Image (cartoon, rainbow, N blue to C red):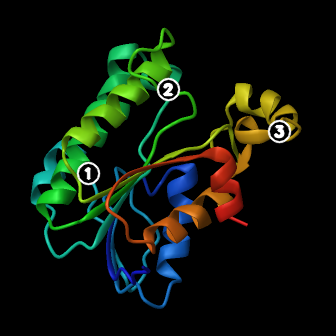
């Protein structure tokens, strides 16, 4: 069954994937309102509401009808400054955003995780992503879609050296480990938003590429 969500809550709209997804949402004729809180102002649009400031302050203040929520929040340990600061964004902030979205009436959450996410992983990054997935499942969403992209390919305002070096090679890797263009990921997330099913769905990177074509 396919849905036509009109009122959308989006976290992470100023990031690489969030920016592409926001552009797509604002150009969808069925979407009448996108509520996209951010730390820095976004470009104005008639269908965009953009509370600006500290998420800890404005999250409880968000209001209005929400059909579906997208979470594109994420950082790196280097940018965050420490493992603790990384967890605060990629785990705690994601979980808090999802909780607020559910309180506002959203029945479907689509969240970006990562390939290899596992709460028992010996790799810190993968372990935090796995813990995040585990926490969201515990919120008992009617519909929860977890997307696990591989290396994201796209132009960042602040280039990441590791991604620049790995990007060309990742295009040659077969299967789910092959890099994915961020525009493909955004298209795939929107297509997943239109599908209605119960429970948890995990979508790996190879399937995301197919959906995003």
- Marks 1 and 3: which is nearer the front? 3
Q: Secondary structure at mark 1?
A: loop
Q: Which residue is mark 3?
A: 174
Q: Which residue is mark 1?
A: 53
Q: Earlier in the sequence, mark 1 or mark 2?
A: 1
Residue 43: tell me if it is visible. Answer: yes
* Residue occupying the point 20% across, 43% down: 96
Which sits in the foreground, 211 or 88? 211
Question: Do residues under tags 1 and 2 come within 8 Å of each other at their CB atoms?
Answer: no
Q: Is residue 34 above or below residue 156?
A: below
**Picture mark count:** 3
As drawn, which residue projects farthest toward the bottom?
29
Left or right of 59, for residue 67? right
Q: Which residue is mark 2?
A: 79
Task: Please identify the quarter of the rendering in which residue 130 is found.
Answer: top left
Q: Residues within 10 Å of mark 3 (few under 14, many from 20)?
A: few
* Residue occupying the point 37% across, 83% down: 47
Q: Position of residue 28 (x, y in %)?
A: 50, 84
Q: Quadrant of the C terminus?
A: bottom right
Left or right of 57, for residue 192? right
Which sits in the foreground, 148 or 86? 148
C-alpha span from label 1 to label 2: 19 Å
- Marks 3 and 2: which is nearer the front? 3
Question: Do residues under tags 1 and 3 come within 8 Å of each other at their CB atoms?
Answer: no
Q: Residues within 10 Å of mark 1 (few under 14, many from 20)?
A: some
């Amino acid at each position: 069954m396919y849905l036509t969500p009109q009122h959308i809550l989006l976290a992470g709209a100023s990031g690489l994937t969030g920016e592409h997804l926001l552009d797509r949402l604002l150009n969808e004729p069925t979407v009448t309102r996108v509520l996209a809180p951010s730390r820095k102002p976004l470009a104005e649009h008639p269908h965009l509401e953009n509370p600006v400031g500290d998420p800890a302050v404005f999250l409880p203040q968000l209001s209005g009808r929400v059909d579906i929520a997208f979470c594109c929040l994420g950082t790196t340990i280097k940018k965050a400054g420490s493992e603790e600061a990384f967890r605060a964004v990629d785990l705690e902030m994601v979980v808090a955003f999802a909780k607020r979205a559910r309180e506002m009436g959203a029945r479907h959450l689509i969240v970006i995780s990562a390939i290899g996410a596992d709460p028992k992983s010996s790799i810190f990054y993968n372990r935090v992503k796995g813990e995040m997935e585990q926490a969201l499942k515990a919120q008992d969403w009617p519909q929860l879609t977890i997307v696990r992209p591989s290396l994201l390919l796209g132009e960042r305002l602040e280039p990441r050296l590791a991604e620049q070096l790995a990007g060309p090679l990742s295009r040659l890797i077969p299967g789910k480990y092959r890099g994915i263009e961020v525009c493909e990921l955004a298209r795939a997330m929107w297509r997943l938003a239109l599908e209605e099913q119960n429970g948890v769905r995990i979508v790996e990177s190879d399937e995301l590429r197919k959906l995003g074509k």
